Amino acid sequence: MRFHTRKWVKPEDLNPNGTLFGGRLLQWIDEEVALYAIIQLEIPRTVTKFMSEIDFVSSAKQGDIIEIGIEVVKFGKTSISLSCEVRNKITRKTIIAIDKIIMVSLDEEGKPYAHGKTKIEYVKDRLEN
């Protein structure tokens, strides 16, 4: 799993229990996965289609630094499937795990669009072409 992004848990991210609000964490995950999928597929109209069961393993509190990890599971004709893990940067303890997130590329009419990608590409590889 490659960890791409770090977030600092601030007071405005907390629920009434003083821990990271689950909705805020899901917002961060959805944004990061969308950015990752858009960059990989090179299609700006890529949206979340599906998220599998979400397993909150532990919590985070104010001041914690968390990191969001994303891994490609597979490429479909119009989609990319990913898994995600969020962990505490310092302790490495898992906070949440999502086995499958499906992102779908859309054409200008909002219909699924074949992206033509079959493997992960890195910026350095694109620059060499």
Image (cartoon, rainbow, N blue to C red):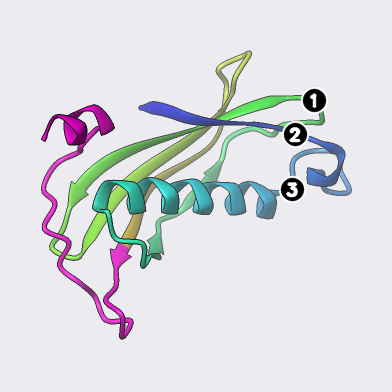
Q: What element carries label 1?
A: loop
Which image quarter is the N terminus in?
Answer: top left
Cβ–Cβ under 8 Å for marks 1 and 3: no
**Amino acid type, mark 3:** Phe
The region drawn magenta spans 104-129
Q: Which residue is drawn at 23% across and 61% down?
A: 79
Rate crowding at label 2 as few (under 14), some (14 to 19) or many (20 or more) other CA atoms within 10 Å: many
What residue is shown with label 3? 21
Instruction: Work out whether mark 1 precedes mark 2 in sequence or the reverse, and give the earlier one.
Output: 2
The disc placed on residue 63 is 1
The disc placed on residue 9 is 2
The disc placed on residue 18 is none
Residue 58 lies in quadrant: top right
Residue 28: x %, y % from top left = 59, 47
Residue 84 lies in quadrant: top left
Q: What element carries label 3?
A: loop
Instruction: Work out whether mark 3 precedes mark 2 in sequence or the reverse, and give the earlier one.
Output: 2
Residue 13 inside the magenta-drawn segment: no
Rate crowding at label 3 as few (under 14), some (14 to 19) or many (20 or more) other CA atoms within 10 Å: some
Q: In the visual, does 105 lie left or right of 7?
A: left
Q: In the visual, does 77 lie left or right of 31?
A: left
Q: Which residue is drawn at 14% across and 52% down?
A: 117
